[in-house]
Amino acid sequence: MKILLTTLNSKFIHSSLALKYLYNNIYDIADVSVREYTINENLQDIFCDIMSENYDLIAFSTYIWNVEHILKLCCDIKLANPYTKLLFGGPEVSFDSIDFMKKNDMVDYIIRDEGEIVFRKFIMAYEDKSFENVESLTYRKNEEIIENIDARPIENLGMIRGAYDIFDENSIKDKIVYYETSRGCCYNCSYCLSSVTKSVRFFPYEKVISDLEKLVNLGAKQIKFVDRTFNYDKKRTIDLIKYLCTLDNGSINFHFEITAHIMQDDLLDALKNVRQGLFQFEIGVQSTNKQTIKAVNRIDNFDELSKKVRKIKSFGNIHQHLDLIAGLPYENLDSFKHSFNDVMALEPDNLQLGFLKMLKGSPINSVVGQFAIKYRNYAPYEVISTQFLSYKDIFLLKDVESVLEEYYNSMTFNYSMKFILSKIDNDYFSFFERFCNFKKGNDYNKNLSRDDRFYLLFDYARSFLSDKNIYFFKELLRFDYLLMGRNRVIPEFLKNDTCKLNSQIKKDIIADIDLSKKFDINTEIKNINSVINIELFDIDIEKFDKENIPEKKESYVVFNYFGAKNFRNIVNFYVY
């Protein structure tokens, strides 16, 4: 039997953790291949690629972001070859599997929940079609759909082969690599599928550190831990954090989903002096409305969370990504605005404004009628309205999300946004709401060029900032523009004609820059200019960067592009 394990990832840079586990746990008993695609690829191209081989069984890993695409693809596969068997697995089909198969008659099998052991049993039983003892399997038998009993969660995770025991080394270099050190969740958030599996189980510690060393050495760009609460076990967390520091090669980034309010002081101490960019934290807040938090079974501890987030912020070395969810019970528009302002006041590096998704199997489905929750009946099952939020409120929040992503989360406007947000009396939501209205009212279209996006923010700032503040803002916006890369053609609206470069100072700065690896002291200025850019500003940008204080003072900034991989790390300041 010839088997294909496949899925459609959200982006090319992503890879499927599930397929790696499945492959490594059946490769010794089956002729199995792995092919990964993305939801952005042409389905016809994917179809042709898959059908170029004569597979007996094709197994798809399904999620809310890819299931609609996969179903279309499977219709074509069945039409082309009705004898090809199709198996689905993953969160999207682990609940209501019988109903799913009734609606989609091209699907032959579904494996629910954890698949490593179940899939191996399924393959071993496949030849005789003796599936009665394969737990967590839903399958067709004649005209009947049969749903076997659920398998128990794998208690000893050390008994399954790891995702990175055997893998293509080329799939690691410069990629985002997903990894888990544990499964399950200790919390019971009603909108999350992790609440269904209560127990938290850990992979063997020695296995974890061995895998991580291997992945870092193979050149992974980022290792993204998918543990639901990475810092659940306090001692294990500190040990892992300290170990990860020893793997720092100067470019690797580790991303975790953590619960901030349970972070202990010794863990914070271990983070205080790590390299900037080594760690990235995702912290779920979801709402600061106490009634909402109680209704979705979360722990209400925003005050403690705020203390920890501010403490980490003070270190200046860890990117913090905070989340909110719109559409939760008891959260009307005014309440959500309050939650938004509470979280923005913590100055996160990224604020993700998400929208409630009524995931199959999640406990919140039991209160749909109670809270008049209306949602799309197809993936990703996103909320349309609730008793507390009208569909027009949702539309407004979608607009705010769009502007937030473009001007705050993109990190393209770091310095100019930092300044302008300090002038709005902490009413962050109103700032973004007014920005949306300004954009619509002034006929800015959706597909703006880079320069247009900068001009839109400048135009909006002029509508409410004083002349003095707009002067500071414009200089910081010019700085943000130059941080984007080697483009020296500054738009007219950002030019400062009062700033005239002093040629002698420019020569002194060039002499001070160590470019000896590429240029000698006699290199012509025009050649040096190919890798550096020197700009004069009318404010002390370095002081604003460090102290958040705008001060009128001439300062030279050198943008050194020589060997730079990250344009956020190319700046040297010279004040004369």
Image (spheres, rainbow, N blue to C red):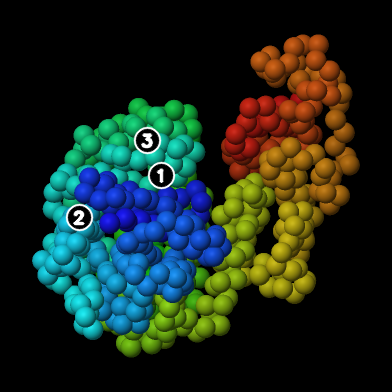
Q: Earlier in the sequence, mark 3 or mark 2?
A: 2
Is 500 situated above or below 407?
Answer: above
Is residue 497 visible to the viewer in this orientation of the structure?
A: yes
Q: Quarter-wise, where is residue 446 in the image?
A: bottom right
In contact (CB < 8 Å): disc 1 and disc 3: yes
Question: Three-letter amino acid code at disc 2?
Answer: Arg
Secondary structure beneath disc 3? helix
> Along the horizontal axis of the image, is 560 left or right of 342?
right
> Along the horizontal axis of the image, is 425 left or right of 360?
right
Few, some or many residues within 10 Å of mark 2 (<14, 14–19, 20+): some
Few, some or many residues within 10 Å of mark 3 (<14, 14–19, 20+): many
Q: Residue at x 76, y 25 (%)?
A: 576
Q: Residue at x 31, y 39 (%)?
A: 166
Disc 2 marks which residue? Answer: 120
Q: Residue 391: percent from the left, percent from the top?
A: 52, 83
In contact (CB < 8 Å): disc 1 and disc 2: no
Few, some or many residues within 10 Å of mark 1 (<14, 14–19, 20+): many
Is residue 191 visible to the viewer in this orientation of the structure?
A: no
Disc 1 marks which residue? Answer: 177
Question: Three-letter amino acid code at disc 3?
Answer: Leu
Query: Front-most of 239 and 438?
Result: 239
